[in-house]
Image: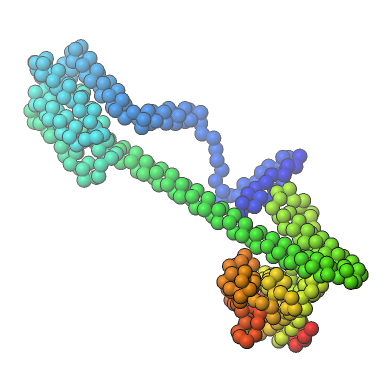
Amino acid sequence: MTEAVRVTGTAGVQQPVRVDEDEPVRVHEDEPVAHDPHPLTQHVQRLVQRVRAVDRRRPLVWDLLVTGFFVTAGLVDFAGGGWRNVAHNTGVPGRLVLVLTLGLTVPLLWRRRRPMAALAVMVLFGTVNGGTGAMLQVALVQLIVLFNIALRLPLRTLGRAGALMLVPLVVGTVRYPRGSWDQQIVPQVWAYALIALLGIAVRSRQDYTQALVERAHRLEVERDQQAQLAAAAERTRIAREMHDIIGHNLSVITGLADGGRYAAAKSPEHAAKALDAIGSTSRQALAELRRLLDVLRDDVPEAAALTPQPSLTDLDRLLDGVRSAGLPVRTAFRGRAVPLPQGQQLTVYRVVQEALTNTLKHGGPGATAAVDIAYADDGVTVTVTDTGRGGPPARDGSTPDPDAFRSGRGLTGMQERTSLYAGTLEAGPRPLPATGWQVRLHLPKISASPAPTAPEETAR
């Protein structure tokens, strides 16, 4: 059974991928394969996460529980007399043993907030513990504080903590020697070193995990930003295409409708031709708009026919439509045609289309236009001029403000298209005494497949 699965690719575009259930899925050798962890591992991870969650939410409660546990264990050892089984001096007074037990366990409450102060207090009582020969086993609680120091404080502080913990050990060994000194000191030193290394290992693991989390968060933010930029660029491109398609065709339709209204009274035949041209232009605009909107659909058939974007070969059809709307247009091609990529051809087409559309909108009656396309070794230069009023008419009938024309979406779209190919675009009123508007586009030469050729020098 074959199933179509959509995979999100570049810029969020979904691409269908065929997956056959009867065939095994092949994984690239370099790609890591995720395996489900062992159930026992999952259980331990969940338990550790719950303990850490409680610790993060209520650290004081957790510190009280840990401290209370060891205080209770020490008091049970004191009350039951179990400490005498390992003591070097069983004649230590009971009150002193009780004080030592509390002094070695209660400072655990501050092991995270003030670990060095807590360790100093415990070392003080530990020195008395070793000097009196009580040798309470609860003194091993100092290792928990040592672990917290290795986990949270700098290494130089860890070195001072290790040196501090050697004081009770040396005092007990000197006061009550049992065998050689290395049999009493070396095992304890190894225990201290192992606890310190364990704290360093856990700290390194936490730092590594935190770095991975920060990197993943940063990559996620960058991915979202790239997706937003891609979406904004796509929206801009679609808006630019819709403006060029709808704006031009509506301008042509407006010109045809105005001409047909005047011709209806005098020449019904010309009015009928104008209506036919309006219908043809409307259908063409609708077809282009539907093709553009189909790009946004997710359920586009795989075998759907793809219509190419307009190119230089479509200029004649564009100019014929403008002429039918009542704007005389003269064209001229100069030089030997330079091969242009499809994107540059579309840019030339849209710039000519937008310039002529602006002439239809703002040129006024009696305006004419000229399109000059000059090929050279360094690229192509397109110049579109008209003899109209050069901008939208002012309310008081004075000379139009060029900035008002320059602020429209059409010129912005032309500038965006030009910048994609490192070209230059100049638009503004023609120098006096000439009237009208001029748009000049230059696109540098880029190697591409051969473009439609034009005569070396022709004029229409």
> What residue is at 75 percent from the left and 42 percent from the top?
2
Q: Quadrant of the C terminus?
A: bottom right
Q: Is 412 or 87 nearer to us in this picture?
A: 412
Task: Give the residue drawn at x 78%, y 58%.
Answer: 286
Side (left or right) of 198 relative to 266 = left
Residue 288: x %, y % from top left: 76, 61
Does residue 434 lie above or below 179 as drawn?
below
* Residue farthest toward the front in the current orientation of the protein: 396
**Nearer-the-camera pick, 376 or 106:** 376
Quadrant of residue 93 in the image? top left
Residue 180 showing in the rendered view: no
Q: In this view, does 23 lie above or below 441?
A: above
**Front residue of this view, candidates 435 and 78:** 435
270 with respect to 126 (left or right): right
Q: Which of 418 and 358 is in front in this view?
A: 358
Q: Indicate how the structure is coloured in the image.
A: rainbow
Which quadrant would residue 275 be assigned to in this image? bottom right
Q: In this view, does 84 lie above or below 352?
A: above
Counting from the top left corner in percent of width and height, residue 223 is at: 52, 51
At a point 79% along the width and 55% down the height, the residue shown is 304
Drawn side of residue 325 relative to residue 135, left or right: right
The image shows residue 326 at horizontal and vertical percentages of 79, 74
One can see residue 433 in this view: yes
219 shown above or below 105? below
Residue beneath the point at 62% across and 65% down:
409
What number of labels is visible? 0
Q: Name the quarter where the N terminus is drawn.
A: top right
Q: Position of residue 305 (x, y in %)?
A: 79, 58
**Residue found farthest to the top:** 80
**Horizontal relation, residue 235 to residue 109: left or right:** right
